[in-house]
Image (cartoon, grey):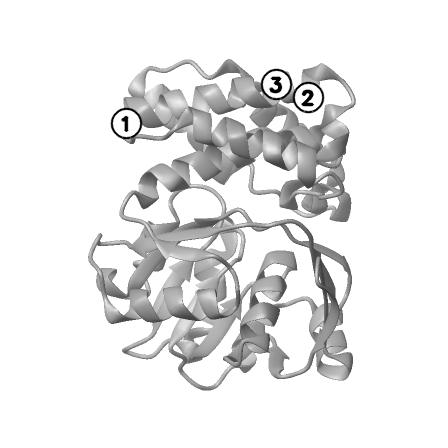
């Protein structure tokens, strides 16, 4: 497939690298000049549990430099940048181009639907971790999965091709009709670990230095799942708890994206994650005090770092 990765940070570069190694024609689109410059010059250095590889069979450029439509655009930008990024990369959007959001947070399907018909929009979640240690170098250790579905709930050739491509890259992907439950479960996971790491500046593993870390994370998970269920979405709290505990045990050195943003002085996605949950909780009359407190604290960190 001809695939464009819109937002080639840690996750986007990891996915793009794996897809390129599987033989797909991949273009990384990003505004980080240092990162795309290193990839153009030296290739993408990708470190996984299998060792380090240098991926050279891909293109790295700014979104506005793209000139040709592609089969699939995988969107990894922060939610608040989605529309501006797709507008800048409009040349990759042809009449048959499918769009897939693997972004954090809520509201992504609605944003993508402004650029394509509902049948061409896919939404999903992934549990793969990734870190960008320096320009041109990305690492991912441990295991992950991807669950996705067409936004309109229907099976399509684009959905089948996308699932196949991601599995060819050994990314453990499956179509999941219950994707909304999966999205809310991922929001619960991120609302817990991302916000806690952003405020404490702990890696995931460092949250286990006292019992408070896991305890706070699980309280946030319970609140988010309660909001989802009040909205009629069958999110599974036990599943999220298991994922949180697995991350605490096996992704010890991982710095979640929100912590990476804090350390780099960038605006975080707190409004699309904890903030969106708090807004949804108010709409259905559910209390979410832990989630709201972390949202307020990350906003303070955001303001100070900027």
Q: Nearer the viewer, mark 2 or mark 1?
A: 2
Judging by the rendered image, the residue that carries numbered circle 2 is 213
Q: How far apart are labels 3 and 1 at the CA level?
A: 23 Å
Label 2 Cα crowd, 10 Å radius (few <14 / some 14-19 / many 20+): many
Q: Secondary structure at mark 2?
A: helix
Judging by the rendered image, the residue that carries numbered circle 1 is 231
Q: Is residue 296 above or below residue 285?
A: below
Determine the residue located farthest toward the front in the rendered image: 50
Front in this rendered view, residue 158 or 79: 158
* Residue 242 numbered tag: none
Residue at 69% over, 52% down: 141
Q: Is residue 166 above or below residue 191?
A: below
* Tag 3 near tag 2, CB within 8 Å: yes
Q: How far apart are labels 3 and 2 at the CA level?
A: 5 Å
- Residue 254 sits in which quadrant? top right
Q: Is residue 177 left or right of residue 100?
A: left
Q: Is residue 78 above or below residue 239?
A: below
Residue at 40% over, 72% down: 72
User: Taking the image as drawn, is residue 106 in sight?
Assistant: yes
Judging by the rendered image, the residue that carries numbered circle 3 is 216
Q: Position of residue 218 (x, y in %)?
A: 55, 21
Q: Position of residue 275 (x, y in %)?
A: 49, 31
Quadrant the N terminus occupies: bottom left
User: Taking the image as drawn, is residue 8 in sight?
Assistant: no
Q: Position of residue 23 (x, y in %)?
A: 53, 81
- Residue 73 sits in which quadrant? bottom left
Residue at 68% over, 33% down: 249
- The mark tally for this picture is 3
Which of pointers 2 and 1 lies earlier in the amino acid sequence? 2
Q: Secondary structure at mark 1?
A: loop
Q: Nearer the viewer, mark 3 or mark 1?
A: 3
């Amino acid at each position: 497939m001809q695939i464009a990765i819109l937002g080639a940070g840690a996750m986007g570069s990891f996915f793009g690298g794996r897809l390129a190694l599987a033989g797909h024609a991949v273009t990384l689109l990003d505004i980080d000049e240092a990162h795309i410059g290193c990839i153009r010059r030296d290739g993408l250095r990708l470190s996984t549990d299998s060792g380090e590889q240098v991926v050279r069979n891909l293109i790295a450029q700014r979104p506005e430099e793209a000139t040709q439509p592609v089969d699939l655009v995988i969107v990894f930008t922060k939610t608040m940048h989605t529309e501006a990024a797709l507008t800048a990369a409009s040349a990759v959007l042809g009449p048959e181009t499918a769009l897939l959001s693997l972004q954090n947070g809520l509201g992504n399907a609605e944003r993508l639907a402004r650029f394509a018909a509902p049948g061409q929009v896919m939404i999903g979640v992934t549990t793969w971790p990734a870190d960008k240690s320096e320009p041109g170098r990305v690492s991912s250790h441990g295991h992950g999965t991807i669950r996705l579905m067409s936004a309109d709930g229907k099976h399509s050739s684009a959905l089948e091709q996308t699932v196949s491509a991601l599995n060819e890259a050994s990314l453990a992907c499956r179509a999941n009709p219950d994707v909304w439950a999966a999205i809310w479960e991922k929001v619960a996971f991120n609302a817990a670990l991302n916000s806690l790491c952003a405020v404490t500046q702990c890696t995931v593993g460092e949250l286990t230095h006292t019992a408070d870390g896991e305890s706070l994370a699980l309280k946030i998970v319970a609140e988010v799942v309660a909001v989802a269920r009040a909205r009629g979405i069958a999110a599974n709290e036990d599943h999220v708890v298991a994922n949180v505990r697995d991350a605490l045990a096996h992704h010890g050195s991982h710095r979640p994206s929100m912590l990476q943003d804090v350390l780099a002085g960038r605006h975080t996605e707190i409004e699309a994650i904890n903030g969106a949950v708090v807004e949804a909780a108010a709409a259905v009359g559910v209390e979410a005090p832990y989630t709201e407190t972390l949202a307020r604290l990350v906003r303070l960190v955001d303001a100070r770092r900027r």
